[in-house]
Structures are given as structure tokens and as C-alpha cells.
Amino acid sequence: MQLQQKTSKFSNGLTLLTIPMPTESVTALLLVRVGSRDESKEINGLSHFVEHMVFKGTEKWPTTQAVNRVIDSVGGVFNAFTGQEYTGFWVKVAKKHLPLGLEFLKQIIFKCRLPKEELERERGVILEEIKMRDDEPMTLVADKFVSQVYSATQLGRDVIGTSENIKRIQRIEFVKHLKKWYQPSNMVLAVAGPASAKGTAAEVEKIFSQKANNVINQPEKLKFKQDKPQTQVINKKIEQAHFCLGVRTFGRVHPDRYVLAVLTTILGGNTSSRLWNEIREIRGLAYYVRSSTDSFRETGYLTTQAGCATDKLAETIKLTVKEYEKISQEPVKDKELKLAKEYLKGRLALAFEDSQIVAGEYGESLLLEGKVRTLAEIYDQLDQVQVDRVQQLAGKIFQASQLNLTIVGPFKNQEKFARLLL
């Protein structure tokens, strides 16, 4: 399915991206270019806290319950999320209710009330969210791996923030945050569904009539230096050990981004991958094992995550290191390469049937890269990946000195596991 997107820019600086799709529902996603990397250490967690608070009453719908009923009343769904580089708010409704969905986004973003009593209540909610994260080792190890890889930089701070910050952040900080970052020139509104580009643009211009504010400077590019492998162990009394083992890679627009996607898929991206086969199917060491990547403006990472018996942790880590070395030293088979490419293209085809995913993928690309990568362009880039490029990239990123290992489990001896990387 080839989607013909259209981009429009309004006088107030808001960028609209419309992606026509033959669906009964429509998704409107508003992305704001601000995240945890834009926070100081003292207010780390504010972007995520703001994401919660905008739903706590607006000018038109003054209570949380009234806000919730707006989309519930037409059978739609809505939610929000915060990352290191942007915050997103989305609503998915039947196509005839798109004007209501757009008004909903306008109200929560530009007309939120931030009532003090709700702020105090929401502190407790987020503090419980932090505790929940800390009690879920699969989530905790992934978060702490990112913190380790980007330690001493803004990207190394938890998106959710710290309990100490959540307890002390005052309402004035929310007001400052919204005033500085939540302005049309710092946003992309992606609408995916059966609405026409012309009709959607007219509706958006009518509803989003905010004035433009000051130009926002982009964050400085971060620099990273690592000259030896890094290990951190988070001691928790749990029955199963969880680990992430990975390396820093490169930013979103790097020419090898699709080579990395293929490499990651071959390693541990699906149930035909090397690590899945070796660790789960052959040796029965883990219920789950997976490799994945993420990327930011100037950097990124590849990681393999698994959970295993505590007495099998060292063996499982060694096997992961061995697979990293193998793919660096030996060319992948043509059959593996073809399977990985077709897997990635097939998963994209399935995902792009959902207006919510399309709005997210296209909107994120436009917000952070300044252009939209179409499905056809992605397919073409994947088709160009060759065996030698996969091996070259693996050899470049899987240097022993660049490995980062994070473990959550009932362990105190960090040095024991650090030796596995030497």
C-alpha cells in the first residue's frame, strides 16, 4: 500500500502531515519536540509529569472526568507518551469524529488548567509508576542500560525522573515548560486516515489558531567517549536474572541505519534469529531473548536482552558475546540476509495497516529528520543492504572496549561479570 502523504505549514508555525488511508478510523497525533534530554538534572522527569497533567482538566472540560468522557463518548481511544527527544499525544476515533479529536488535542495542549489539587494527586500516581518500574526487572534493566550507555549526559537520565524530583517540582515549572516548548512552531500534527488533506488542513487551521512564539534552539550535540567495557549490577532479590548487553551506534539519519536493522534482525530480531535459536531453542537457557535498536539525534544503540536462571547468567552472556564476535568475523549467509530483509519488509507492511502506527512513524520522521521516509523508500534501502556491509558494520560496533552490560538480579559481585567482557 503506497501512502501519499502531504505536508502543510501554517502561519503560526504548526506543521501538519496528512496521510490518507482507506480505514474507518482516523488517528491524530500531536508531537512536541521536547523530552528528557531537554531537562536539567533538577527538573528531570518534568516532561513526563507534564504529559500526565495536561489531561487533568481544560478550559472547555474543566475536570479529569470531563476530559475522559469526551473521547469515551464516541468510542475512541487516546493516550500519550514521553521519550528522550519528544512527547506525543494521540487520539483515534471513527472518521466522522475527527473534528472532535482535533479539538480534544487543542484543549489538552493549549488550554490545560494544571489544577494544584490534581498536581498533588498525580505526584502519587507517578511515584507509584516509578515503584512499578523498579519492581519489573525486564523494564528496569532496559532503562538502566540506556542510563549506563549515556551516563553523564542528558540522554542518560530516566525519562520518568527521580522520586526526589517528582516530590518537589512545583506548578510554576509546569507553566514555564509549557510556555517554552508547547508552541506550534515546535510541533508536528500527523493525521492518518480517510480524511482528505484539504479538508483536514481547513479543520486544523480553524481549531489550532494559536499564535507563534519564540524560535526554539535545538539541543547541542552530545559527545561520548568509552575506552573500556562497562558493567553495572543492580542487586535485587528475584528468581530470574535479566541482562542487557549492547553498544552505542549512530544517529537517526546515518547511511547505515538499515544495515543496522538487518544486522539486529539476524542477531536476535525474531524466532529465526541466531541468538533465539542458540540460547532458547538449542540450550533452553531463556524464555525470552531479543535484540533491538533505538536512535536519537546524534547517537543510538543496539542491545540484546534476556532473562535466565541466575546460575546460567554467565553462560548466557558468554553466548551473546560469542554471537557478536561471530557476525563480526564471518559473512552472514545469503539466505539469512534475504530472510532478514523480507521479515523487516513484511512487519512494516503489517504495521502500516494501522493508522496509529502510520501517524507515529511518519510524524516522528518529519519531526526529528525534517522529512518523511515512505514505505517504498524504506523497502528500497533494505534491498540495497549487502553481506559485506553487515559484516563491516558488525566489526565496527562490536569492539570489546565498547560493550556495555547491565544486570538485574541477586548479585553483589560486579567484577565477576565484568570479566566476561574482556
Image (cartoon, rainbow, N blue to C red):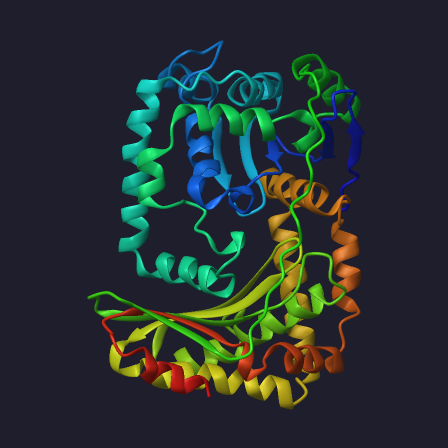
Q: Position of residue 27 (x, y in %)?
A: 60, 32
**298 or 262, which lies in front?**
298
Name the residue at 50% across, 87% down: 322
Horizontal side of residue 157 vs 2, given as left or right? left
Quadrant in the picture for residue 161: top left
Above or below 238: residue 159: above
Residue 303 is situated, as x and y percent measured from the top left of the image, at 51, 69
Viewer-nearest residue: 392 or 306: 392
Query: Vertical placement of 305 versus 359: above or below?
Result: below
Residue 141 vs residue 97, the one in the foreground: 141
Q: Position of residue 324 (x, y in %)?
A: 55, 82
User: Is 255 or 377 nearer to us in this picture?
Assistant: 255
Total marks in image: 0
Asked if residue 53 is positioned above or below residue 365 in the image, the reply reads above
Quick check: 317 left or right of 222? left
In this orientation, does residue 207 appear? yes
As displayed, is residue 352 above or below residue 60?
below
Q: Is residue 282 visible?
A: no
Percent from the top left, x then y, of residue 74? 48, 19
